[in-house]
Image (cartoon, coloured by chain):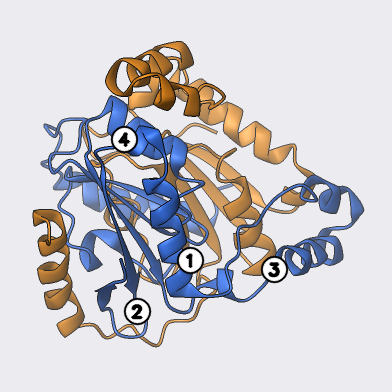
Chain colours: A orange, B blue
Amino acid sequence: MTSAVEQNLIEGNKAYSSTFKDGHLALPPSQKYAVVTCMDARIDPAAAFSIPLGAAHIIRNAGGSAREAFRSLVISQQLLGTTEVLVIKHTGCGMLTFDNAAARGVVAKNKGEAAAKEVEELDFLPFPQLEQAVKDDVEWLKGKNVEEGIRVSGWVYEVETGRVRKVE
Amino acid sequence: MTSAVEQNLIEGNKAYSSTFKDGHLALPPSQKYAVVTCMDARIDPAAAFSIPLGAAHIIRNAGGSAREAFRSLVISQQLLGTTEVLVIKHTGCGMLTFDNAAARGVVAKNKGEAAAKEVEELDFLPFPQLEQAVKDDVEWLKGKNVEEGIRVSGWVYEVETGRVRKVE
């Protein structure tokens, strides 16, 4: 059976592909940069950060963690030629609202002991302070030998206003 | 100094935020689902997969790896209430074009021994066959206790046509 979410994807994609004209774009990002940002539903990176189709890699995970994005960034830079990365975290992020113990407690309560065991070694990578988390990620990347020669900057996106501001 | 990429972000975001009207959206995704897809520059998930702002978590990494997305998915589901996940990989993916040994070799050649050492333990998560990689990720998720009760499906997006098709 097709779910409502699947039905929405199928119908919306039919409309999108019916006018699609970008099949010629190349694999390597034309503007040679990558963005690391959060999976948050309120962020549309292409629109909010002005990224044309084909221009940049967009990496997203819970919290916009540059550490978790490391594998993707190495591929982006070393195999696909990007030379700049923007780390963009955001106000109102879920990662500001819990710590590892609380997250594990929720899993145990929701799903029981077998599920809790699957996440007992997992670092959920929460952070208590937004700007500091941006700076920490930027410094962490700058400390990697493989990132030498890559330009790294850190930003905050405000989900309340749609505005972005530079942190580092 | 501000780079051209940063200047583009600042100017584009000024235009975006000047007409922004979505500051009221809630943190939990309104349509209770998550999408895992690739960081590839040619994919605009909001447009191609018909995802309104605020509706779904969008997780992106090199190859659209559900394994690497596991932390984000647990947060999405257990802390923010999503109940469905779509894994969408794509044709022409860079992950089809190398293996771990080749990727490490490129890093060593580009950046030298210290950089190569930083990635020697890194699994780049390449895959040799697209549809099979989608199926593997879907099965891997379905095998997790913490994913019990979550609906999981697998898809392929064609960067040449803009079309999406269901694999599993």
Q: Which of marks 1 and 2 precedes in the sequence?
A: 1
The residue to which callout 3 is attached is B99
Between marks 4 and 1 in the image, the one whose residue lies nearer the viewer: 1
At label 3, the amino acid type is: Asp
The answer to whether mark 2 and mark 4 are in CB contact below 8 A is: no
Q: Which disc, if any, is residue B76?
A: 4
Q: Disc 4 to disc 1, how far (Cα)? A: 22 Å
Query: What secondary structure is found at the residue carrying circle 4?
Result: helix
Q: Are marks 4 and 1 on the same chain?
A: yes
The residue to which callout 1 is attached is B133
Q: Disc 2 to disc 4, how far (Cα)? A: 26 Å
Question: Where is residue B73 shown, x and y percent of the image?
Answer: 37, 39
Q: Which of marks 4 and 3 precedes in the sequence?
A: 4
Q: Nearer the viewer, residue A87 or A106?
A: A106
Q: Which of marks 2 and 3 precedes in the sequence?
A: 3
At label 1, the amino acid type is: Ala
Viewer can see residue B50? yes
The residue to which callout 2 is attached is B158
Query: What secondary structure is found at the residue carrying circle 3?
Result: loop
Q: Nearer the viewer, residue A22 or B32?
A: B32
Image quadrant in which you'd find residue A144: top right
At label 2, the amino acid type is: Glu
**Relative to B20, is B126 on the left or the right?**
right
Q: Chain ID for label 3?
A: B
Q: Are marks 1 and 3 on the same chain?
A: yes
The answer to whether mark 1 and mark 3 are in CB contact below 8 A is: no
Q: Disc 1 to disc 3, how far (Cα)? A: 14 Å
Taking the spot 40% from the left edge, 66% from the top edge, the residue there is B89
